[in-house]
């Protein structure tokens, strides 16, 4: 039994012992702007997804014709017009003072239902923002009581946060655009296997302080690959050309 997750550039299949989930969250944050076409396609591929936005993410969602069910933020980067438009369209809007400890994304994560998450508008910009966002997403994932994959995705980069015991199959829609495949340990160590790439690994113990399993590529003639997180928490990263 497997659960399929569809992104514009790749279909991801997770082998599961239990009944696959039908619920999914789609969130948009205020980092590098995904293209309108990418966000629109992402929503079309996941028509049952509930849409959530953190601050400037509402600008991106509205531009793609998407209306979030919740918009949360301090309005320091998102436009006032987007906040007003979302409210007029029936979005639940929560505003916060900018002088707060938690980030807009952290506050949004506190309100998300427990379900697999695809989040866009997360890449680019400042490294400290990306660092905070990544570890906030890891913490949220760990708090969920069921398998809860998290995808950080736009047209250029996709990162899947995979947990112990998960085996994934990736089918790339345009494999010629895949520039790199990397395995990133997000725990002190993570044991992983990967097939369908030029440099396969089997039960490799990856160290967080020596992350060497980067810049792999698809094996000749392949349009996909499989990767398994045997223990720990593993980031499965893909870089795509335009």
Image: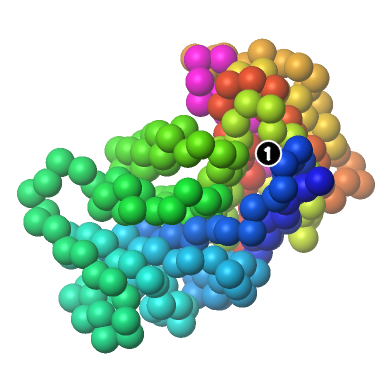
User: Which residue is farthest bottom?
Assistant: 88
* Residue 29 rendering spot, x and y as whole percentages: 37, 58
Residue 1 colored in magenta in the image: no
Helix, strand or loop status at disc 1: strand
As drawn, which residue projects farthest toward the right?
221
Q: Main secondary structure of the magenta part?
A: strand
Q: Which residues are magenta?
A: 180-189
Residue bearing mark 1: 181
Q: Residue at x 49, y 75 (%)?
A: 36
**Quadrant assignment for the C terminus:** bottom right
Q: Residues within 10 Å of mark 1 (few under 14, many from 20)?
A: many
Instruction: Estimate the x, y position of residue 62 in percent, counting from the top left.
Output: 39, 78
Does residue 189 appear in this view?
Answer: yes
- Residue drawn at x 36%, y 38% is 136
Res. 31 visible in picture: no
Question: Looking at the image, what colour scheme do you see?
Answer: rainbow
> Where's residue 157, x and y in %?
56, 50
Residue 155 located left or right of residue 11: left
Left or right side of 56 for 25: right
Q: Residue furthest front?
A: 19
Residue 181 lies, with reference to residue 96, above or below; the image says above
Q: Position of residue 124 (x, y in %)?
A: 41, 51
The structure residue drawn at horizontal position 73% and vertical position 30%, both measured from the top left corner, is: 228
For image coordinates 24% across by 70% down, the residue present is 93
Q: Relative to 110, is 156 on the left or the right?
A: right
Task: Give the answer, above or below, for where 222 lies relative to 30.
Answer: above
> In the rendered image, which quarter is residue 161 located in?
top right
């Amino acid at each position: 039994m497997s659960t399929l997750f569809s992104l514009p550039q790749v279909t991801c299949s997770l082998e599961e012992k239990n009944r696959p989930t039908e619920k999914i969250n789609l969130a948009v944050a205020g980092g590098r702007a995904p293209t309108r076409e990418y966000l629109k396609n992402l929503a079309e591929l996941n028509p049952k997804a509930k849409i959530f936005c953190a601050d400037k993410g509402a600008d991106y969602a509205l531009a793609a014709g998407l209306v979030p069910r919740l918009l949360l933020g301090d309005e320091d980067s998102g436009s006032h017009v987007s906040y007003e438009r979302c409210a007029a369209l029936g979005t639940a809007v929560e505003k916060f003072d900018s002088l707060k400890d938690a980030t807009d994304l952290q506050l949004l994560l506190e309100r998300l239902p427990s379900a697999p998450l695809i989040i866009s508008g997360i890449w680019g910009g400042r490294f400290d923002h990306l660092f905070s966002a990544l570890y906030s997403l890891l913490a949220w994932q760990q708090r969920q009581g069921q398998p809860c994959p998290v995808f950080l995705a736009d047209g250029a980069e996709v990162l899947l946060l995979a947990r112990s015991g998960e085996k994934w199959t990736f089918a790339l829609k345009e494999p010629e655009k895949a520039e790199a495949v990397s395995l990133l340990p997000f725990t002190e160590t993570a044991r992983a296997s990967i097939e369908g790439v030029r440099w396969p690994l089997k039960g490799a113990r990856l160290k967080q302080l020596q992350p060497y399993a980067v810049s792999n590529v698809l094996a000749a003639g392949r349009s996909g690959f499989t990767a398994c997180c045997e223990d720990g928490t593993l980031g499965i990263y893909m870089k795509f050309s335009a």
